[in-house]
Structures are given as C-alpha cells and as structure tokens.
Amino acid sequence: MNNYYKYFKNKFLRECAIWSILYTIIMLLLFFLFKVTLSRNTYFGYEFMYPFYHWANHNKVFLVFLVLTSGYVVIILRCFKKALKYMDEIISAMEEVYKKDDELITLSGDLKEVNAQMNNIKFNLRENEKIARDSERRKNDLIIYLAHDLKTPLTSIIGYLTILKEENDLSERFQRKYLQISYDKALRLEDLINEFFDITRYNLKDVVLEKSVVDFSFMMEQIIYEFKPLLIEKNLSINSKIEPEIKIDIDTNKVERVIDNIIRNAINYSYNDSVIDIDVNKSKDFVNIVITNRGSTIPRVKIDHIFDEFFRLDSSRSTKTGGAGLGLAIAKSIVLAHGGNIHIESENEIIKMIVKLPV
C-alpha cells in the first residue's frame, strides 16, 4: 500500500501542476486580451458594463489573484476527487487479488501500471499457494510412506530376533546370518528415523554457519575415501582430480553434508560398472566442484524441481534411492548460505552436479 500511496501522491501532484500551469497561461492570456480590448474603446460612464470595467481596471492585481486562486481550488478538488475515485477502484480490486480464480483485474486506463502490479501479485499468490500445497502434499505422502516403511525393517528385526531367542538348536552359520540380517535392517531403520528428523527439524530458510578455514583439497580426499565400501556392490570406481592446497572459509560439517549427499546420489543413480568423475579446482572467485556420473538422463521437467523440498527423483520406495526428498534441497540451502550456487546438468546419459563455493 505504501507504493500505491506514493504512486497516487506523485500522480496527484503531477496532474495538479500540469492543470495549474495550463490554467495560469490561459487566464493570463485572457486578462491580456481583456486589457487590450478595454484600452481600444472610449467609455463615457453610462455604459452598462462601465462600473465593472472601472472596478476591474483599478483592482487588476486583486482580480487576477481571485480568478487564479478560485481556479486552483477547483483544479485541486477535481484532481483530489479523481484520486479518490482511483483509490476506490484500487480498494475494490484488492478484493479480486485474493479470489481463487484466473480472472484478470481490470482498472482504468490511467492505472495501467497499478493494474499490471496487482495482476502480478494475484498470480504470484496463486503460484505460491500451489507450490505450498504441492510441498505439503509431498511431505504428507512421504511421512505416510516412511511410517509404512518403518514397519518392514522393524518386523524383520523382531522376527529374526525371535527365532534366535526361541530356537536353541540353530547352527552357528544361521545365527550369524540372522544377526547380520537384523543388523542390516537396524541400519535401514536408523536411516528412516533420520529422514523423519530431517523432515521435522530442518529449516531450509534459516541455515546458521560456523565457518573456519580448512584445507578443502584434503577434506575432499577424505570424503571420497570413505565412500569406497559403497562402490563395491555396483562395481563402481571414482576418478578424482583435485587441485592441491585449496584453502577455503566454510562451515565444514555442512559442506561435508553437501558433498556426501551428491556423491551418494551419484552412486545410487549410476549404471553398474561405471566411473564417477570428481573434479575440484579453484578459479579467481570460486572453488568449483564437479561430480559426474553415468546414469539415466534426467528429464528437463524433473531437473527444474530437483532442488525442491520433498521432491524425489525416483518415485518408487526403493531402499537404495527412497530418501525423503530433502537431501538436495538441504544441499542447495547450505551452498546458498555460503554465497555459492549449485545446479545440475543431464544429457546423453551423463549427470553432472556443479557446486561453486566463494573463495
């Protein structure tokens, strides 16, 4: 409303000034013509208009002041009335902004600038409501899915532990086998519970950083090394090219979470027997991290939403790729909080995640 107030104030003052200037010029021209006309005639004192002409001739300044002032008052009242009409129109149109329809708001021609702003506000509100509804729906769906998924490993753990408890004559081989299954299911249960925590506690709009200067090259090498056991199942390998001695001021734990999430996704969505390339280098203003893997090309429509909260690239509830859809949203919020940027490219079965962190 403050912007509209300034808009109408400026419009009101501008119109008053223009009309006042035009009125002043016209009145002065009329006074001049009136004076010239009077000076060309001879009056004997008995003419019908002579008293007025005589009075006007001796009170020229007062007459000019009276006529101009009266005109200015009329102009101000007219402009003010017009501004009030515009304000009534705007107030009525404000109700249209919150209507849940796709009808355009139409104002008077003089209000085309305000008209465009109000239509933008209306459709931005519709779009934001749609995004909020979609996000809430995805969140609710994921909570339902996760709650359902919690039962599966928990049931397995209880089942196998019950067998171990009640079957006294189980061979050592089966005992180890059932313990290993129970352990694996417990780890899966832990992952699902962590996803629940992420959904309920992580505020993507309020990332607080605790920065310190670190050797980022060494940090990347450590992170990559820790992923070696996860490469075995799909027979993957990591080809890293890291520029040495890159020093950078970052929140180590949060950036480690970003890199961890990206490499984990690269492993999950890579073809078997393929290579993941990790390139880290320093330019003038940024440290560039490029992680490339070979996998199914991501459609453009999914790339546009891949950093949205609760968006999952894989719609199935696979234990390997069935996360809560928060990983990349959290990664983006952390990178943006550092003043960097992150984006993804995918074509010809190549997926490339590019992260830039300011030096």
Image (cartoon, rainbow, N blue to C red):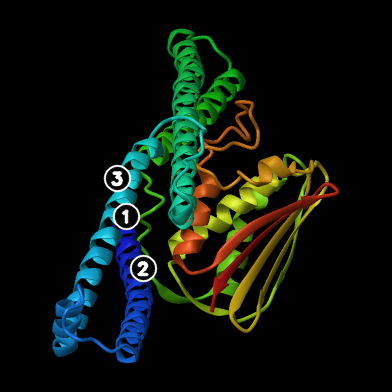
Residue nearer the viewer, 340 or 87: 87
Mark 2 vs mark 3, foreground winner is 2
Secondary structure beneath dot 3 equals: helix
Q: CA distance from mark 2 to mark 3?
A: 18 Å
**Which residue matches tag 2?**
15
Q: Which residue is mark 1?
A: 82
Q: Is residue 2 visible?
A: yes
Alpha carbon distance from label 1 to label 2: 10 Å
In the rendered structure, are the residues bearing label 1 and label 2 in contact, judged by CB atoms less than 8 Å apart? yes
Q: Is residue 95 above or below residue 43?
A: above
Q: In the rendering, at what x and y percent does residue 169 appear?
A: 52, 9
Q: The residue tagged with tag 2: helix, strand or loop?
A: helix
Image coords of residue 359 (percent x, y): 54, 79
Are the residues tagged 2 and 3 within 8 Å (C-beta)? no
Asked which secondary structure carries label 1, the reply is helix
Is any atom of residue 65 visible in this view? no
* Mark found first going from the N terminus, 3 or 1: 1
From the image, which quarter does the N terminus lie in? bottom left
Q: Amino acid at mark 3?
A: Asp
